[in-house]
Image (cartoon, grey):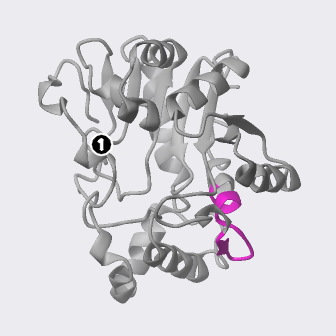
C-alpha cells in the first residue's frame, strides 16, 4: 500500500520454462533463484504488495510449496494467458495499478524499480502505462512495467491475439493511440540493453548470474546495478559467459508500433 493507492507487483513464474526448465529453482547463494529475486524486489522503498503468479498446472505445485515455505504470497491462474493471470491477480487484491516483473530478473535493482514506480505515481494522471522498455536502455533483466488497473482491464477485454495474451502488455504498447504511454530511460545516457544481459533464459545466463551473486552477495546482499557494473569492469571475463545471447529476448522481435509513438505520447527521462 502506497498511501491510499495500492500497487501490486506481479512476479510471473512457472516450472516448465521452454528454454531452461525449473530455472526459478536454481540455487543462488543458498536459496532458490525465485526467492532471491523476490528479496530484491522487496527492497523497494515504496513497499508494494508482491505476489507470485503461477499456473494451475500440477507441476507448479512446487512453486506454491516454495512460496508457502518462504512466506511469499501467490496466485494461480491461466498457464498461457498471462494477461488474464495479471488482471485476475490485480482484481483479487484490489490493486489500483499492477506491475509486471518477470521471474527471470534475479539481478534487478531496487533503485530502478523505485524510479519507474515513482515516475508512474507522480504522473499517473498523464499515463496509463509506464515502463523502462520502450525504448530499453538498462541492462536486460531490469524490466519494470506498471499500468493502471483500468488499462489492464481494457487490454484484457480487447486483446484477442495469442501473443498479446501470452505476454500481458503488447496490446497496450501496440496501441499508443488508445493508451497514454510513458518511458523511463537510464539517466546516465548509456544504452546497455543490447550489450549487458542480466536475465535468465539459458544455462549460460544462470552461470553468469551465479558468478555475480558469489562475488557480490556475501559482501552486500543488496548489491546494486552499479556494483555489478563495477565487478564486470574488474572481471570482464564474466561477460563472456553468456555473451552470445546478448540482445536475445521476446519483445524486441515483436515491437510493431513504436515508430508511431510520438513525443507527446511517450516521455523519456
Residue drawn at x 60%, y 44% is: 11
Horizontal and vertical percent position of residue 33: 64, 65
Rate crowding at label 1 as few (under 14), some (14 to 19) or many (20 or more) other CA atoms within 10 Å: many
Question: Is 170 in front, or is 4?
Answer: 170
**Which quadrant of the rendered structure holds the C terminus?**
top left
Report x, y in % for residue 176: 25, 19
In percent of width and height, residue 171 lies at 35, 24
Q: Residue 84 occupies which quadrant of the picture? A: top right
Q: Which residue is mark 1?
A: 185
> In the displayed image of the protein, which residue is found farthest to the front?
58
Q: Nearer the viewer, residue 126 or 207?
A: 207
The magenta span reads 26-37
Instruction: Identify the image quadrant of residue 173.
Output: top left
- Please tell me whether residue 16 is drawn above or below residue 97 in the rendered image: below
**Quadrant of res 59:** bottom right
**Is the residue 64 above or below the residue 37 in the image?**
above
Residue ID at (66%, 27%)? 89
Q: Is residue 203 left or right of residue 8?
A: left
Label 1 sits on a secondary structure element that is loop
Give the residue drawn at x 32%, y 15%.
179
Amino acid at each position: 500500500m502506497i498511501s491510499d493507492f495500492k500497487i501490486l507487483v506481479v512476479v510471473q513464474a512457472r516450472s516448465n520454462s521452454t528454454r531452461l526448465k525449473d530455472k526459478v529453482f536454481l540455487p543462488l547463494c543458498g536459496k532458490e533463484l525465485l526467492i532471491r529475486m523476490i528479496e530484491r524486489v522487496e527492497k523497494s522503498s515504496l513497499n508494494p504488495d508482491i505476489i507470485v503468479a503461477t499456473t494451475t498446472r500440477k507441476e507448479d505445485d512446487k512453486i506454491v510449496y516454495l512460496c508457502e515455505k518462504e512466506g511469499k504470497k501467490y496466485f494461480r491462474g491461466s498457464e498461457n494467458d498471462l494477461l488474464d493471470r495479471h488482471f485476475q491477480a490485480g482484481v483479487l487484491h484490489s490493486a489500483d495499478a499492477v506491475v509486471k516483473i518477470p521471474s527471470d530478473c534475479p539481478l534487478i535493482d531496487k533503485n530502478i524499480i523505485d524510479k519507474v514506480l515513482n515516475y508512474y505515481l507522480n504522473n499517473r494522471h498523464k499515463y496509463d502505462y509506464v515502463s523502462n522498455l520502450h525504448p530499453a536502455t538498462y541492462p536486460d533483466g531490469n524490466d519494470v512495467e506498471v499500468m493502471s488497473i483500468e488499462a489492464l482491464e481494457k487490454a484484457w477485454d480487447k486483446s484477442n491475439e495469442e501473443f498479446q495474451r501470452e505476454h500481458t502488455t503488447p496490446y497496450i504498447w501496440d496501441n499508443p493511440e488508445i493508451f497514454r504511454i510513458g518511458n523511463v530511460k537510464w539517466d546516465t545516457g548509456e544504452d546497455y540493453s543490447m550489450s549487458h544481459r542480466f536475465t535468465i533464459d539459458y544455462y549460460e545466463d544462470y552461470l553468469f548470474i551465479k558468478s555475480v551473486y558469489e562475488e557480490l552477495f556475501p559482501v552486500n546482499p543488496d548489491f546494486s546495478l552499479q556494483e555489478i557494473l563495477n565487478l564486470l569492469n574488474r572481471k570482464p571475463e564474466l561477460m563472456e559467459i553468456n555473451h552470445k545471447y546478448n540482445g536475445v529476448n521476446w519483445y524486441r522481435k515483436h515491437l510493431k508500433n513504436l515508430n508511431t509513438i510520438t513525443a507527446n505520447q511517450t516521455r523519456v527521462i
